[in-house]
Image (cartoon, grey):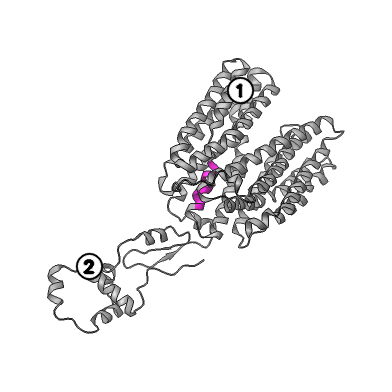
Amino acid sequence: MPHPDTTQPPHTSPASAAASSASRDQHRSPASAASRAPHPTPGSAASRDQHPSPASTASLAPHPSPASAAASRDPHPVRRPAPGGTARRLPRNPYLRLFAVPGTRAFTAGNLIARLPAGMFGISEVIMISAAYDSYALAGSVTATGLAASAVTAPWVARLVDRHGQARIAVPAAAVAALGHLALLLCAHLHAPAWTLFCAIALAAATPNTGGMSRARWAHLLRGDAAALHTANAFEQATDELCFMLGPVLAAVLCSALFPEAGALAATVLFLTGVLLFASQRSTEPPVAARTAAGSPLRAPGMVPLLAVFLATGAIFGSMEVTTLAYVDGPLAGPVLALQAAGSCAAGLLYGRARRTAPLRTCLAAMTLLMAAPLLVSGTGSLLALAAGLLVAGMATAPTMVTGMALVQRLTPPSQLNEGMTLAVTALLGGIAAGSATAGWTADHAPSPALGFVLPVTAAALALTLCATTGVDRRARG
């Protein structure tokens, strides 16, 4: 939305003439004021306002006020020119406009470094533990314990972030989580008893929700601009997809090229470094809201049905991943799965440029249809056909997640935004765990691995049904 050019001189009116006269009186020396005060010239204020000189215009500029400071955070400002220059408007590209807001590039860079390990820890720890103990079952149990512990602790960490601020909580929480990952690495390297692995991974569950904190910063900086916030949410979702595309590949390369613990070690260093860089950007950190008696965001009308939709949506991702791994059953499974994330990343960026957003039920209906693509091509036995099907299926993921997270932001009180978004992520993780377990059982007992591709379609249809029957989409938009 274009904004008025604030660098132009004000229109001449009685009010503006009086204001400019008062401004000149504030900057006039006592001597000159006294010499001119006894002999006022009628209309002189108006005549000076109609024909200001550049020097006088500069000298009459008002002092910055809280209102002008707030306006400087406008997501679509007009850059003020240097003296004698001309104003330069921001780019028309909505993503470039996002990063014209002061401070956004710095906190995004730090947050990206902190989020990349999210796609590295899982596969790194599976490789590390299986290599040390020669047991994929133990590795799977340890990582599952970590997910379960995170589901319990993450909302509490997010609540502390809302109450005390991002930097004050995220840094110590990240330090505790890093110690947990390093302890797990040492236990595996020293071949410690298996129970120590479970203790270490439980300590790592203190990990703060870096993606939620980044979205909270965008919501603070872009408050009142729904279009810009939609673009920011789309960018955040594309960032998630990028991390889960690059993270597993980077982890696998490090573990195979260096030593089994290299992936986990690099992920820990990147995570702690990224959180420190992100937390150091205090100018964009949302202020701590006054504590209220609102209770948990779960009490917000419509939040529980929306979390149920997220739970079913997570089952889509978990079942699709395990079914694809069982179907491909080889080293190409990773690159093939990455195509699904690539399709989601591209669709998310395009969706962020859209002027109008789709309702959540429309996104879920599209996801139900597109998730059928891998099922339809799996009968051909062609790996290329499956890769194309996953690319198409992924195109519904990011728009659905962007729309769902936007609903969470609308339903959650601003003072509890981090906790609300963390609850949504927790529901997703629960759905991923349930979908993965169901798909694993299906892969072991079904006559053909291709039958597992029925599960993502079923989970998508369930999410659509929950959204339609509960009316959470209409309730949040209303």
Residue 372 x, y percent position in the rendering: 79, 48
Determine the CA span between mark 2 and mark 1: 69 Å
Q: In the picture shown, does residue 60 fall above or below 128? A: below
Question: In the orientation shown, which residue stands out farthest toward the bottom?
Answer: 42
Q: Secondary structure at mark 1?
A: helix
Task: Name the amino acid, label 2.
Answer: Gln
Task: Name the amino acid, label 1.
Answer: Phe
Say whether residue 85 is left or right of residue 144.
Answer: left
Say whether residue 57 is left or right of residue 97.
Answer: left
Residue 443 x, y percent position in the rendering: 80, 32
> Mark 2–mark 1 contact, CB under 8 Å?
no
Query: Residue beneath label 2, please?
Result: 26
Query: Residue beneath label 1, please?
Result: 198
Give 80 or 28, whichever is nearer the viewer. Answer: 28
**Residue at image location 67% in from the left, 55% down from the top:** 473
Q: Secondary structure at mark 2?
A: helix
The part of the chain drawn in magenta is 210-219
Residue 234 visible in rendering? no
Question: In the orientation shown, which residue stands out farthest toward the right?
Answer: 447
Residue 255 position by quadrant: top right
